[in-house]
Image (spheres, rainbow, N blue to C red):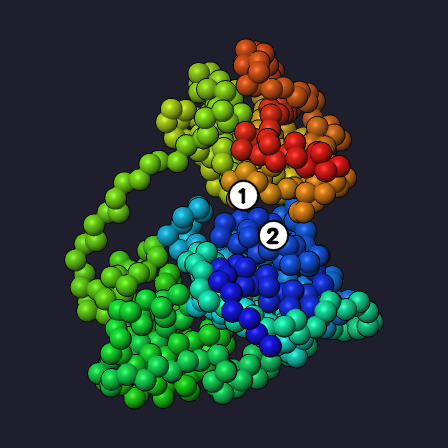
């Protein structure tokens, strides 16, 4: 039995996970993936936020080693954090189903880069499915768990912003199975990747990929839209939707499993048309692989590599129209909310002329007017270590102006190691880290984290206290202040700590103004 509903791609993935009996959903919030675990929790699934993506994947691996089904969700840059376990688990695999959602962000709607995570599938040797709409998000998620268990391999499910957030009609099935209790089968030769076992595992991995290529050739994940012979298009993901509108007369080969590729199917399709063009969003991953197989296809000009594709851009791509594209209309620049607790902190750092090593979160907006108080930003947790590097090489007068600024969720994500580095390899001038603690993961939708004292579903949980963590590591001075309520106290404290040679952490704590009412309601539930 099926029922027709309207659902986004993220909702569809969550529904599929629940309907196919996933035991555990884990991840770290990051646009455009954040809604998946929230929805999985609403469906009745067991979902939890991990401190970061590496921890999330490792917890999921443990669940899958115990013959459970585990879903891991993250945005594209999150897979960088989880890459270490990803490359090893590709060799060993797990007896239980393990599906990793990578939500890529072409056009950088809310990201620091637009990396194409199809590269990870090839580099790690992990099979990848790419849905093009909510229905495929649902169907491919269920099939991914089946394939994962059948072949004992993790499966990457790559979605993009447009697929994650767009809604379409979904035919949802009745639940196929309920989450069942796991069990552990002792199998160290498969599960322990010492060199002797890993060499065998590597050969098994390549053999499995050849098997999956044969499976892909059978057409389960490909769709052929028959059109004219003059133009054929090979595509995948959301690009398929654009191609259908931009070139309704074309023959189209849509690929659903984009690693390993069905090269013979592609070869046959390319030979059946007079002109064959590969239309893909992001990097030329498909076109490079297809050309490497000796199949003559056209790719896209470099100008179409940047940002999201749309119908107009695909028309121009197919026509070879390289007319410079007009800039999108200027929108209202993002800014910190009126009443945001970070505003007074940035006003102070700006007025004191600090060199600010920044981090990832809503507080990154401190780089924009009227504050213009963030000088560097690399990746999650880098504010502390980058700041330490600057302290090492700048003349003393400049070094004493360097401050690292990081948020509470980001600190617990990857900032703790930076504090260890600060204490262990302290610069001669010491260092100052300011943790802007607004009691939520604000930028991605006000999710919980280990420092809030609440779980994903906002029920009470043990609270990791940031001040206890940094004191335990060995920081010399730890101060907790409200920079909004007492800006002058905050200012004098910053000046004092910058003047000394000690390692100092100031926690500027005040709840996010958007989350405040919700936080109070969670408290009432306790």
Instruction: Quadrant for the N terminus, please.
Output: bottom right
Q: Residues within 10 Å of mark 2 (few under 14, many from 20)?
A: many
Report how far apart the C-alphas of labels 2 and 1 lie in the structure: 11 Å
Residue displayed at 64% across by 59% down: 43
Q: Is residue 73 above or below residue 498?
A: below
Whether pointer 2 and pointer 1 mark residues with C-beta atoms closer than 8 Å, the reply is yes
Q: Percent x, y for residue 160?
A: 45, 59
Q: Is residue 131 above or below residue 50?
A: below
Q: Which residue is mark 2?
A: 38
Please give the count of numbered marks on the rendered protein.
Answer: 2
In which image quadrant can residue 351 be found?
top left
Nearest to the observer: residue 28 or residue 35: 35
Q: Report the disc number at residue 5.
A: none
Q: Is residue 419 above or below residue 347?
A: below
Residue displayed at 53% across by 49% down: 30
- Callout 2: helix, strand or loop? helix
Would residue 130 be visible to someone looking at this image? no
Judge from the rendering whether residue 33 lies leftward or rightward of residue 251; answer left or right. right
Q: Which residue is mark 1?
A: 445
- Callout 1: helix, strand or loop? loop
Judge from the rendering whether residue 22 lies leftward or rightward of residue 109; answer left or right. right
Q: Residues within 10 Å of mark 1 (few under 14, many from 20)?
A: some
Q: Percent x, y for residue 324?
A: 18, 54
Nearest to the observer: residue 170 or residue 220: 170
Sequence-first disc among 2 and 1: 2
Q: Percent x, y for residue 498?
A: 56, 17
Residue displayed at 39% across by 65% down: 238
């Amino acid at each position: 039995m099926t029922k027709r509903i309207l659902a986004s791609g993220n909702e569809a993935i969550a529904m599929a996970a629940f309907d196919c009996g996933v035991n555990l959903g884990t991840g770290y919030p990051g646009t455009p993936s954040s809604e998946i675990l929230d929805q999985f929790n609403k469906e009745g699934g067991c979902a939890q936020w991990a401190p970061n993506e590496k921890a999330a994947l490792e917890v999921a691996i443990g669940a899958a080693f115990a013959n459970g089904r585990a879903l891991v969700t993250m945005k594209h840059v999150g897979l960088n954090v989880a890459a270490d376990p990803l490359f090893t688990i590709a060799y060993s695999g797990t007896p239980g189903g393990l599906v990793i959602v990578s939500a890529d962000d072409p056009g950088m709607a809310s990201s620091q880069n637009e990396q194409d995570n199809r590269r990870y599938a090839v580099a790690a040797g992990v099979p990848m499915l790419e849905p093009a709409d909510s229905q495929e998000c649902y169907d491919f998620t269920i099939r991914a768990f089946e394939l994962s268990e059948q072949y004992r391999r993790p499966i990457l499910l790559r979605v993009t912003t447009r697929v994650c957030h767009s809604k379409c009609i979904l035919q949802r099935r009745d639940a196929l199975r309920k989450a069942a209790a796991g069990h552990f089968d002792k199998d160290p030769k498969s599960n322990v990747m010492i060199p002797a076992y890993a060499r065998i595992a590597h050969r098994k991995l390549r053999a499995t990929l050849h098997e999956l290529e044969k499976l892909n050739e059978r057409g389960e994940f490909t769709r052929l839209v028959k059109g004219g012979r003059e133009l054929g298009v090979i595509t995948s993901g959301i690009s398929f939707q654009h191609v259908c509108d931009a070139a309704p007369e074309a023959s189209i080969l849509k690929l659903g499993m984009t690693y390993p590729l069905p090269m013979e199917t592609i070869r046959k399709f390319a030979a059946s048309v007079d002109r064959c063009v590969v239309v893909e969003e992001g990097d030329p991953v498909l076109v490079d692989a297809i050309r490497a197989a000796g199949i003559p296809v056209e790719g896209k000009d470099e100008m179409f590599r940047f940002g999201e594709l749309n119908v107009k851009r695909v028309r121009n791509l197919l026509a070879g129209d390289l007319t410079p594209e007009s800039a999108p209309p200027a929108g209202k620049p993002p800014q910190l909310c009126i009443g945001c607790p970070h505003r007074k902190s940035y006003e102070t750092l700006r007025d004191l002329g600090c060199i600010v090593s920044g981090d990832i979160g809503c507080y990154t907006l401190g780089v924009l007017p009227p504050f213009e108080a963030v000088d560097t930003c690399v990746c999650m947790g880098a504010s502390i270590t980058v700041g330490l590097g600057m302290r090492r090489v700048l003349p003393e007068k400049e070094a004493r102006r360097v401050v690292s600024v990081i948020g509470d969720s980001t600190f617990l994500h990857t900032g703790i190691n930076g504090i260890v580095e600060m204490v262990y390899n302290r610069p001669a001038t010491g260092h100052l880290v300011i943790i802007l603690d607004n009691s939520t993961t604000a930028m991605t939708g006000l999710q919980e984290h280990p420092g809030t004292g609440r779980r994903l579903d906002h029920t009470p949980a043990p609270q990791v206290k940031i001040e206890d963590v940094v004191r335990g590591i060995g920081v010399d001075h730890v101060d907790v202040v409200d920079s909004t309520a007492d800006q002058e106290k905050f200012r004098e404290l910053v000046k004092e700590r910058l003047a000394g040679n000690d390692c100092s952490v100031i926690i500027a704590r005040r709840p996010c103004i958007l989350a405040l009412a919700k936080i109070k309601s969670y408290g009432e539930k306790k």
